[in-house]
Amino acid sequence: MTLEHNSSTHPLLPPTTEDQRFDWLRLLRSRRVGISTFYRLMGDHGTAAAALAKLPEIAMAAGVQSYEICPEAVIHAEFKAARAVGARLVCRGDGIYPQTLMDLDDAPPMIWVMGNSDTLAKPQIALVGARNASSLGGRMARALASELGEAGFVITSGMARGVDTAAHLAALKTGTIAVLGGGVDVLYPAENTGLAEDIVAQGGLRLSEQAMGLQPQARHFPARNRIISGLSLAVVVIEAAAKSGSLITARTALDQGREVMAVPGHPFDARASGCNMLLRDGARLVRNADDVIEALAPLAQPAPELPLEPTQVERPLAEIAKLHQKILDRLGPSPVGEDQLIRDLGATSRAISPALTDLELEGRISREPGGLIALRA
């Protein structure tokens, strides 16, 4: 389905009710609605409910006959499956949605998570490599994962055989995230069932953008890999053939502006050819965890503490109501720009934006194309 892009968009507001979360998931699960289409529909129509109502009309205009949106029963079943295993739906804009994913053009609008969601807020390093890892490759993965974990990094990987498995196992005590190609409740490969359960039991996290119960297919893994790299400050490739999923992850990491590092290998070992190619092309060489930590030192430094904005301090209801009234007094039936409103009020965007969201949700103001705001008639 091809949609005409509307350059004037609504801000993407995270869902605040279960009904809204249901609509978000239903929209994304509807036929021909991928990630870019989801964001475009939300930008054009403001809410998932409004976008769902328009979908058949949009599909017909695109030449798709007899279009039906995703049945409600399918979404009810997905939520039921999630409740059965203790999975949680995290939407973009939620407080625990990973900040590292926010700057990706194709960031998943929603992810299912199982385990300790606090892990998402910690600095992550991706360790990836060959499924048929050598003994040395497995030892290197375990050593890096263990030492980087002790240094405060969460180890992120794809729970595949070989390097992924070794990295997860070594990081169980310090924190690890497994990004899956199928549903977050589908434990693949089967021999890693115990590992998958241990990750959740020992304070780590399993994560997937795919539907609950979905069996992984080959086409899912490149999408999975972009999340692995997107979550991480850096991707370390331990062993990889010249044509492998690990190199796809490395290329995606470069596109995302992430650091790419590689462990060198013997020229005669096909499992090392991909790593050696990365090093030839400028990737940082990794001999031990110190090499990784040294490379990431500037990125891993905590941001300097800034004075708290007034809106970061708990404010009494009377003060919030007063700000709401000041905004309403400045608005009329003729739309004005949000930037102009902020200047007129002599306040900061951080102070005004939450109040505008409150007023929009209360139905007292409306957002118009072009970032304009008006009193709702």
Image (tube, rainbow, N blue to C red):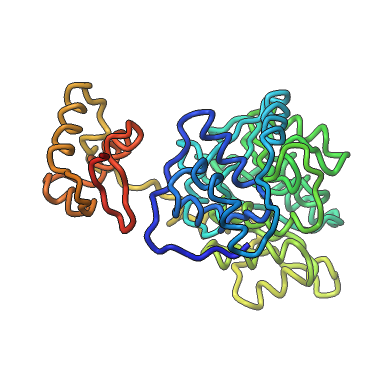
The residue shown at (64%, 68%) is: 251
Nearest the camera: 222 or 163?
222
Nearest the camera: 104 or 23?
23
> Does the image show residue 303?
yes
Q: Residue furthest bottom?
A: 280
Name the spot of residue 278 as percent of width and height, x first. Answer: 67, 72
User: How many discs mark residues in the rendered view?
Assistant: 0
Left or right of residue 130, residue 292 in this image: left
Nearest the camera: 115 or 126?
115
Q: Does 344 appear above or below 63?
A: above
Q: Does 274 appear above or below 301?
A: below
Tell me the quarter of the image containing the N terminus. Answer: bottom right
Tell me the quarter of the image containing the C terminus. Answer: top left
Left or right of residue 168, residue 266 in this image: right
Q: Does 168 appear above or below 288?
A: above
> Does the image show residue 290?
no
Name the spot of residue 7 as percent of width and height, x first. Answer: 40, 64
Left or right of residue 59, residue 257 in this image: left
Name the spot of residue 373 as percent of width and height, x first. Answer: 26, 48
Name the spot of residue 138 as percent of width and height, x first. Answer: 79, 51
Left or right of residue 277, residue 35 in this image: left
The residue shown at (47%, 56%) is: 103
Q: Answer with the quarter of the image where residue 236 lies.
A: bottom right
Q: Answer with the quarter of the image where residue 188 lies.
A: top right
Q: Answer with the quarter of the image where residue 74 lies.
A: top right
The residue shown at (17%, 44%) is: 332
